[in-house]
Amino acid sequence: MKKNKWTPYRHPNDEEQQIFQELLGNEIKVEALLVSNNEHQVYTEYIFLYNHPNDDNNNLVSFYAKVDLKKELIKISTAQLTEKMILRNTKEVAAGFPLLENVTKSIGLKYSGQIFLDHDILTVPNYRTSSQATYFFDCDGNGFNSNGTINEDSPKGSFCCILSKKNEYYILTAAHNLKKVKGAKEYRLIRDKKNVVPLQFVEYYIDSKNDAAILKIGEKVPEDLWNNRISFHSAEIPENKIPVVVVGHEEKVIESAVVDSSEDTTPYHFGLSNGGEYGMSGGPVFNKTNNSKLYGMYLGTGNTACVKYLKIENKNSKISKDYTLC
């Protein structure tokens, strides 16, 4: 059997350029400079490199996408390749990975084999019984098998928090969690067969800065979802090196620390010393010592990106002015 292998970076062909444009979104007018791909039997992985369109220094951005045979997006992540970003991630990415092996040589960035972060070892409290850890966001409507059991093969995400507006309730999750659903745009939160929360799509924001979606909970918020949620009473911009907790479905809890909050790629994102796992996209990132403070939402982009709740924008105003944390 042929071993899957990343190809050397090269100029993208027309088909790859089209895939890049569709994944990035038609609103962003930018072309991929280089591409590397890794073909598997049922999906293909791509890493596109392009110049950040809103950056005066035109820094490179790596754009990872996992796409199935029908060109449907399975997984996505981005990171800006500043020198600081490369140094920050070398402890997490093997040196043989083409992104570091090829690109850092070609653009002359410094390489560090290992970097240590000067923060204490954290002891994570038990958030594994929270709604954010026990419910999952049903990304494509196929969360159940025909016999009523959980479909382990369906794509799953997490949710960040419950929001309220005009006596109605909503959830916040990552926009890239929303997959195509047959018929109407109907989604749900699932804990088990007896605990299913129907969701109505409201709006989403996805571009080079934002990756957030709002979905309305049905007529009533279930007691199990409400009583076991991690409740946030305030949202703020984190300070560097502050300890945080990331929570996601399947009772996943990750300890981490903020890295260079004020100096990252945009004011919408900040880095983490440790990233999450598959399915945690959309989960909350909050203060370790004061868990009522929400900082953002984990986007599943390695260790580098969390959307700040305070900075998610829609067409009219910032989301924090329209919705209230619960």
Image (cartoon, rainbow, N blue to C red):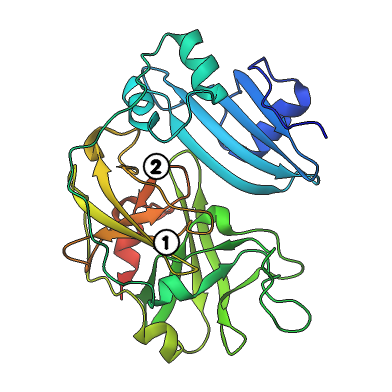
Q: Amino acid at mark 2?
A: Asn
Q: Residue at x 73, y 32 (%)?
A: 4
The answer to which quarter of the image holds residue 84 is top left
- Quadrant of the image for the N terminus? top right
The residue at which mark 2 appears reads as 303
Q: Position of residue 78 (x, y in %)?
A: 49, 36
Binning the other alpha carbons within 10 Å of mark 1 as few (below 14), some (14 to 19) or many (20 upward) gives many
The residue at which mark 1 appears reads as 283
Q: Position of residue 85 (x, y in %)?
A: 36, 28
Question: In the visual, does 101 lie left or right of 129?
Answer: right
Front one among 22 and 117: 117
Q: Residue at x 36, y 78 (%)?
A: 229
Compared to residue 303, the image places residue 127 above or below, namely: below
Compared to residue 191, the image places residue 154 above or below, namely: above
Compared to residue 287, the image places residue 60 above or below, namely: above
Instruction: Point out the residue furthest to the right here.
Output: 1
Q: Can see residue 197?
A: no
Q: Residue at x 57, y 57 (%)?
A: 177
